[in-house]
């Protein structure tokens, strides 16, 4: 049992990664859409690359989107609108109309025959006017359109022009007066009608919409059927519109089938195997090419959570509307991984994620092609993400690539530029806007996972920050030394392709531990008298060595990232405080422990920390050059760095002899520029 527990403890990191893969696979497969997957890719206007394909069963042919849209437009165009006839208004106005006739024309100047004639004309005209009612002409429909006129429970079809418009009322009355030769009473009759006529027909929007919805709901989504055993497409045939629609219909029919329990488990196992394979390949890639990341479970967890985030977001959008698939800013993944790690890992993880999504997205080949191309463009174009303009430029480039690739696919599949669905370009644009949120996302990742990006490095490089300002006040000589080292280290990193911003920030903070006892370090001493003259060499050596431990403590207290603290830990490696070692040796011969004069390490373990060690030693020792000639500088740089190489200080760093030689050349050139002789000006 004890042996088993020891084995578990020894391999706990590997067991954690296995558990992480299992959990990730479970979550991805659990939320995958449940349905059959059609095994053939269908590319319109392309040759069918498979064997002759026959219908496995009878199925209906789905209408294309264009066909459905055309039918819907026809129904909307031919839909008959509804109008309401208010009977109460007609009855009320007719009563008041009769009363007003008697009041206006019942006088001594008119005979009974004339009065009867006028009353008969008025009532007949009133009834004719209200035969189909009076409406307000809003210009919404053409007068020749047939409409439904609803009078109570009765509905009749009439021409809209049969319903008198309020604008035509005066002309209608005037015309009737002229036809009946009652011009002598024109003013009185017109006034009579206008006082007693009221609009009583109005457009019924609700009933019209309800009728339209019913008509639209009756549209059949299919046209015709394909019989079992009939050939759908032959090998090498071009997939024209008809064949494409038959194949798409078969795919929809196939994927909509209900699963039985055995099929459900079988397909789920297939998904589990494929997703597991993709994630294991990613882990193997990280182990082979990024061992430092593989050994850090925090970083591995970060990568897998990013994959889950992108897959989950895509599945959510698929559930809402498949057409919005390109709104998902999937290039956030390579952007974030490049910000914290490197472009190669970012691109590989992006490709693996796209392959996983290819199982469940529609038009998987087109989707994977567009997303992989976009990921490559993201990796190639983004540099110095902390500069806001670069992010906007990258978003623009990615959107352009999406657009051109999509248009190319559409031209191949549709064979006409007029058939391209330009609303997809809007989705690409929205996805680009989503990419702009990568900066706050990176900031969140930094706080949650304790990672370090260029954005944070840029903030840390500000010499007005609290810690560096304190260093400049407490130990101005050390601050000046750190600035010089930062410049040398940045130039060296650029020449060998290391992270220049990281090594610069590391150089700025590497000696903050000297703030504890700044007077014991020569660069901060204002006189030729050194406090070391009054103490034992061993004590002096311990003060010098302890600046490293105090620097680590101060850095942690001020929440500096671990990657910056690494520079404080390693910038002296396991070298010896040689000056005090020799002084102790002269005083006590060999009666002392040499390890008391040695830094505890660790040695530099990457290019950046190795660069800092070289630059720090060279810059500090350069102050002792009495005659800084070109020859002396060359010899001096060679001597210091070669000694570090001989002591195996760079044995753990991923740095080559060629790169060390390149760094030497940079340091020699920089020191020659610093110590060059100026022309002596006359007094």
Image (cartoon, grey):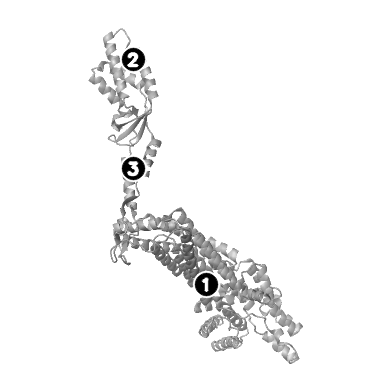
Q: Quadrant of residue 256?
A: bottom left
Place of residue 137 in the rendered image (x, y in percent of width and height, measured from the top left): 33, 32
Q: Nearer the viewer, residue 162 or 636?
A: 162
Looking at the image, is mark 2 or mark 3 earlier in the sequence? 3
Q: Few, some or many C-alpha atoms within 10 Å of disc 1 (few <14, some 14-19, many ≥20)? A: some
Q: Dot 1: what SS? A: helix
Q: Few, some or many C-alpha atoms within 10 Å of disc 3 (few <14, some 14-19, many ≥20)? A: some
Q: Nearer the viewer, residue 258 or 384?
A: 258
Compute the Cα span from label 2 to label 3: 46 Å
> Which is more foreground, mark 2 or mark 3?
3
The residue indicated by pointer 3 is 76
The residue indicated by pointer 1 is 283
Q: Check residue 518 in the rendering and tell me which mark sits there, or answer none.
A: none
Asked whether residue 475 is in view, the answer is no
The residue indicated by pointer 2 is 101
Residue 25 lies left or right of residue 373; in this view the side is right
Residues under numbered marks 2 and 1 in contact, where contact means CB atoms less than 8 Å apart:
no
Residue 612 lies left or right of residue 366; in this view the side is right
């Amino acid at each position: 049992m004890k042996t088993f527990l020891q084995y578990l403890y020894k391999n706990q990191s590997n067991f954690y990664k296995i558990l992480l893969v299992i959990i990730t696979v479970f979550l991805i497969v659990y939320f995958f859409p449940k349905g059959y997957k059609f095994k053939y890719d269908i590319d319109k206007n392309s040759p069918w690359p498979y064997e002759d394909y026959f219908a496995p069963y009878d199925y209906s042919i789905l209408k294309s989107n264009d066909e459905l849209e055309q039918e819907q437009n026809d129904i909307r165009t031919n839909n008959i609108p509804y109008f309401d006839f208010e009977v109460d208004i007609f009855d009320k106005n007719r009563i008041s109309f009769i009363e007003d006739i008697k009041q206006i024309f019942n006088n001594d100047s008119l005979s009974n025959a004339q009065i009867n004639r006028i009353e008969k004309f008025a009532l007949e005209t009133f009834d004719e006017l209200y035969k189909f009612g009076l409406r307000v002409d809003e210009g919404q429909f053409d007068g020749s359109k047939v409409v439904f006129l609803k009078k109570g429970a009765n509905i009749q079809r009439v021409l809209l022009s049969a319903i008198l418009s309020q604008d035509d009322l005066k002309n209608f009355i005037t015309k009737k007066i002229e036809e009946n030769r009652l011009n002598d009473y024109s003013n009185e009759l017109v006034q009579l009608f206008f006082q007693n006529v009221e609009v009583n027909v109005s457009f019924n929007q609700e009933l019209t919409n309800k009728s339209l919805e019913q008509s639209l709901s009756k549209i059949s989504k299919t046209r015709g059927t394909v019989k079992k055993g009939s050939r759908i497409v032959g090998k090498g045939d071009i997939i024209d519109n008809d064949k494409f629609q038959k194949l798409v219909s078969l795919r929809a029919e196939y994927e909509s089938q209900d699963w039985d329990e055995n099929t459900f488990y079988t397909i789920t196992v297939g998904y589990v195997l494929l997703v597991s394979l993709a994630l294991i390949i990613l882990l193997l890639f990280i182990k082979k090419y990024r061992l430092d990341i593989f050994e850090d479970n925090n970083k591995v967890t970060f990568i897998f959570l990013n994959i889950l985030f992108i897959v989950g977001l895509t599945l959510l959008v698929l559930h809402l509307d498949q057409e919005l698939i390109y709104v998902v800013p999937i290039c956030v993944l390579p952007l974030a991984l490049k910000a914290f790690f490197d472009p190669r890992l970012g691109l590989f993880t992006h490709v693996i994620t796209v392959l996983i999504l290819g199982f469940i997205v529609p038009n998987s080949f087109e989707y994977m092609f567009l997303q992989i191309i976009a990921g490559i463009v993201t990796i190639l174009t983004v540099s110095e993400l902390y500069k806001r303009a670069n992010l906007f430029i990258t978003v623009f480039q990615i959107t352009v690539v999406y657009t051109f690739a999509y248009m190319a696919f559409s031209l191949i599949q549709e064979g006409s530029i007029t058939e391209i669905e330009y609303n997809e370009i809007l989705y690409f644009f929205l996805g680009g806007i989503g990419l702009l949120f990568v900066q706050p996302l990176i900031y969140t990742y930094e706080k949650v996972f304790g990672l370090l990006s260029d954005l944070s490095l840029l903030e840390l490089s500000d010499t007005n920050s609290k810690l560096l300002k304190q260093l400049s006040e407490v130990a101005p000589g050390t601050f000046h030394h750190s600035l010089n080292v930062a410049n040398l280290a940045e130039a060296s990193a650029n020449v060998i392709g290391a992270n220049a911003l990281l090594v610069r920030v590391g150089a700025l903070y590497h000696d903050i531990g000297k703030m504890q006892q700044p007077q014991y370090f020569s660069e901060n001493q204002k006189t030729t008298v050194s406090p070391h003259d009054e103490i034992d060499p061993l004590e002096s050596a311990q003060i010098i060595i302890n600046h490293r431990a105090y620097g680590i403590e101060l850095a942690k207290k001020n929440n500096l990232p671990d990657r910056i603290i690494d520079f404080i830990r390693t910038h002296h490696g396991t070298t010896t405080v040689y000056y005090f070692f020799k002084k102790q040796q002269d005083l006590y011969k060999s009666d002392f422990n040499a390890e008391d004069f040695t830094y505890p390490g660790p040695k530099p373990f990457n290019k950046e920390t190795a660069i800092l060690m070289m630059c720090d030693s060279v810059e500090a020792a350069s102050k002792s050059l009495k005659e800084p000639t070109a020859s002396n500088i060359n010899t001096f740089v060679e001597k210091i760095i070669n000694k570090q190489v001989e002591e195996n200080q760079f044995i753990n760093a991923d740095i080559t002899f060629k790169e060390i030689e390149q760094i030497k050349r940079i340091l020699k050139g920089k020191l020659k520029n610093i110590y060059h002789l100026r022309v002596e000006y006359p007094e």
